[in-house]
Image (cartoon, rainbow, N blue to C red):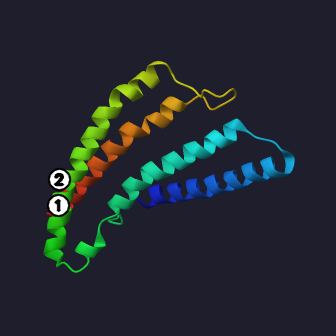
Amino acid sequence: MKTFGNILGIGIVLMIALSFVAIGLHTFFNFTSIPMQELIVYLHSSVFMLGIVYAYSHDKHVRIDIFYQNKSETSKKRINFFGTVFLLIPFSLFLFYASYNYVLSSWSRLEGSAEPGGIPFVYGLKSLLLILPVLLIATALVSLWRKR
């Protein structure tokens, strides 16, 4: 999982660098690169969606700490268990179900960018809508198994 985090970190640095270059090119040379702008969006989407799994696997995900912080370890485990079973897993299953035909349609057409010269792999980006819930459920099940 550490390698996964390092890759996400490199993605963030690359996204920031490309954003800086894109803004510089536009500001100083009045040049805009559609592929570069789309690559920034692809990186942002990938880092954000895969970062959710990374944060969850390291127990750094968002929760309402005002209710959680003063609880005993037993209460925290109980809250995490019920939150995982009744919120995370059902949401992940719903996201997979709701996105399946959308992603499948994109793959069947090998959907590309609507912009001339854009990145032709929109279907790959949309696949994150299926990858995210699968990874979240797998991570949640491993987490539940370890904490039992």
- Tell me which amino acid carries mark 2: Val
Q: As drawn, which residue projects farthest toward the right?
A: 29
Give the label on residue 60, or none. Answer: none
If the image is split into quadrants, where does the N terminus sit? bottom left
Q: Residue furthest top?
A: 109
Q: Which one is in front, 6 or 124?
A: 124
In this rendering, the answer to whether 109 lies above or below 52 is: above
Q: Position of residue 104 (x, y in %)?
A: 39, 24
Q: Position of residue 78 (x, y in %)?
A: 14, 66
Residue identifier under label 1: 81
Q: For the residues marked 1 and 2, what is the alpha-carbon distance in whole angstroms?
A: 6 Å
Q: Residue at x 21, y 45 (%)?
A: 90
Residue at 42% across / 22% down in the picture?
105
Residue placed at 81% from the left, 42% from the top? 31
C-beta proximity under 8 Å, tags 1 and 2: yes
Spot occupied by residue 88 in the image (x, y as percentages of width and height): 25, 51
Rendered image quadrant of residue 81: bottom left
Judged from the image, the secondary structure of the residue bearing numbered disc 1 is helix
| Dot label at residue 85 | 2
Q: Secondary structure at mark 2?
A: helix
Whether 82 is drawn above or below 44: the answer is: below
Judge from the rendering whether residue 28 lies leftward or rightward of residue 120; answer left or right.
right
Tell me the kind of residue under disc 1: Phe
Q: Residues within 10 Å of mark 1 (few under 14, many from 20)?
A: some
Please give the name of the residue rendered at 49% of the width and 33% of the height, measured from the top-left corner.
Answer: 124
Q: Quadrant of the C terminus?
A: bottom left
In the image, 89: left or right of 114? left
User: For residue 60, which quarter of the picture?
Assistant: bottom left
Q: Is residue 132 left or right of residue 7?
A: left
